[in-house]
Image: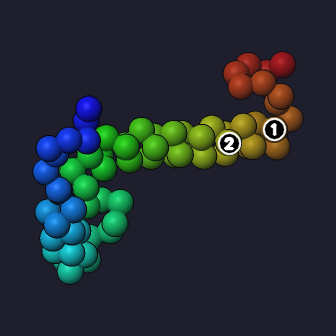
Amino acid sequence: MGFYNNPNRVPQYQRMYQQAYKQHTRLWQIHPRSNILMIPYQILLWGTFGSTLYMLSRKALGYNTWFGEK
């Protein structure tokens, strides 16, 4: 079983989060695995935003497709 004889990491994480919070680090940037989660999220967020603006401008110019003039 995975729950037996595991060390309690709550005090360790609590110290780490409190020290980073005192240095005004944002909460989602504190944990060591945060880059693994945030980088794909940022790529999807800004990629979707950019593609939305691209198609908004194409639609305003009268084009209904991603590429081409038809």
Q: Which of labels 2 and 1 is toward the front?
A: 2
Quadrant including the N terminus: top left
Looking at the image, which is closer to me, 60 or 55?
Answer: 55
Q: Is residue 20 visible?
A: no
Residue drawn at point x = 15 percent, y = 70 percent:
15
**Quarter in which the C terminus is drawn:** top right
| Residue 7: image location, x then y, percent | 13, 51
Q: CA distance from mark 2 to mark 1?
A: 10 Å
Helix, strand or loop status at disc 2: helix
Q: Position of residue 23 (x, y in %)?
A: 19, 77
Tag 1, which secondary structure? helix
Residue for badge 2 = 52
Residue 64 versus residue 3 in the image, above or below: above
Few, some or many C-alpha atoms within 10 Å of disc 1 (few <14, some 14-19, many ≥20)?
few
Residue visible at 75% across and 43% down in the picture: 56
Q: Amino acid at mark 2?
A: Thr
Nearer to us in this view, 57 or 10: 10
- What amino acid is found at the position of numbered circle 1 in the picture? Lys
Where is residue 37 shown, x and y percent of the image?
37, 43
What label does residue 59 carry, if any? 1
Asked if one can make out residue 27 in the rendered structure from this viewpoint, the answer is yes
Instruction: Tell me if 43 is positioned left or right of 33 in this view.
Output: right
Q: Earlier in the sequence, mark 2 or mark 1?
A: 2
- The 10 Å Cα crowd at callout 2, few under 14, some 14 to 19, many 20 or more, is few
Q: Compared with residue 15, is residue 10 higher up or lower down, i.e. above or below?
A: above
Residue 16 vs residue 35, the one in the foreground: 16
- Looking at the rendering, which quadrant does residue 3 occupy? top left
Camera-side residue: 13 or 48? 13
Tell me which residue sits at (42%, 38%) in the image: 40
Given contact means CB atoms under 8 Å apart, are the residues at marks 2 and 1 in contact?
no
**Apparent side of residue 19 relative to residue 41 in the rendered image (left or right):** left
